[in-house]
Image (tube, grey):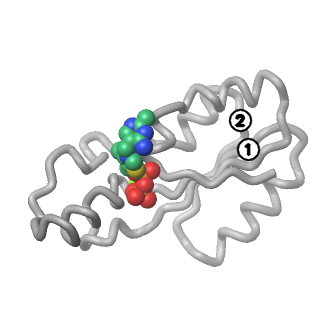
Amino acid sequence: MVAVVGDGSAMYGIQALWTAAHLKLPITYVIANNRSYRILKERLVSMRATDKFTGMDIRDPEIDFSALAQSMGLAARRVAKPEDIVPALREAAGRQGPSLVEVMVADGFGG
Ligand SMILES: Cc1ncc(C[n+]2csc(CCOP(=O)(O)OP(=O)(O)O)c2C)c(N)n1
Ligand SMILES: [Mg+2]
């Protein structure tokens, strides 16, 4: 089973990773890390015609989701190159318990 979630959304319930490790659930978690709440920025631009973003960056400090997952007992890997995604997913699927693949993606606003 694969669960795909944004970095911001992942922070609403990151403790679920501990539960998955505790119960040894066969789930591969994929976090798309764009260091922001991109959807909120996109909506502001398209519906409010503004690019004044308040509290929508998750950068200072940046969150290391792989380290976060490892601290809760998951095998985890950060991927920054597209060609590394499939091997990382295969590796994760081959494990018994839960794994996390953190995929670094563009934030859509130049960063
Ligand atoms: C508990 C909760 N708080 C706030 C929201 C409002 N909300 C919807 S999407 C979103 C940002 C999601 O950011 P992310 O998961 O990083 O997705 P991105 O658009 O960056 O890919 C927020 C704050 C929500 N849906 N649920
Ligand atoms: Mg995000």
Q: Are marks 2 and 1 in contact (CB under 8 Å)?
A: yes
Q: Is residue 40 left or right of residue 71?
A: left
- SS state under label 1: strand
Q: Amino acid at mark 1?
A: Ser
- Is residue 11 visible to the viewer in this orientation of the structure? yes
- Is residue 63 visible to the viewer in this orientation of the structure? no
Q: Alpha-carbon distance for marks 2 and 1? A: 5 Å
As drawn, 102 above or below 98: below
- Crowding at label 2, few (<14), some or many (≥20) Cα neighbours within 10 Å? many
Q: Nearer the viewer, residue 84 or 57?
A: 57
CB of mark 2 near ligand 1 (< 8 Å): no
Residue at 64%, 26% (x, y): give it. Answer: 72
Which quadrant of the view contains residue 41? bottom left
Q: Position of residue 100 (x, y in %)?
A: 67, 46
Residue highlighted by disc 1: 99
As drawn, 90 above or below 59: below
Q: Is residue 88 left or right of residue 38?
A: right
Which quadrant of the view contains residue 44? bottom left
Residue highlighted by disc 2: 74
Q: Amino acid at mark 2?
A: Leu
Which quadrant of the view contains residue 76? top right
Please count the marks in the image. Answer: 2
CB of mark 1 near ligand 1 (< 8 Å): no
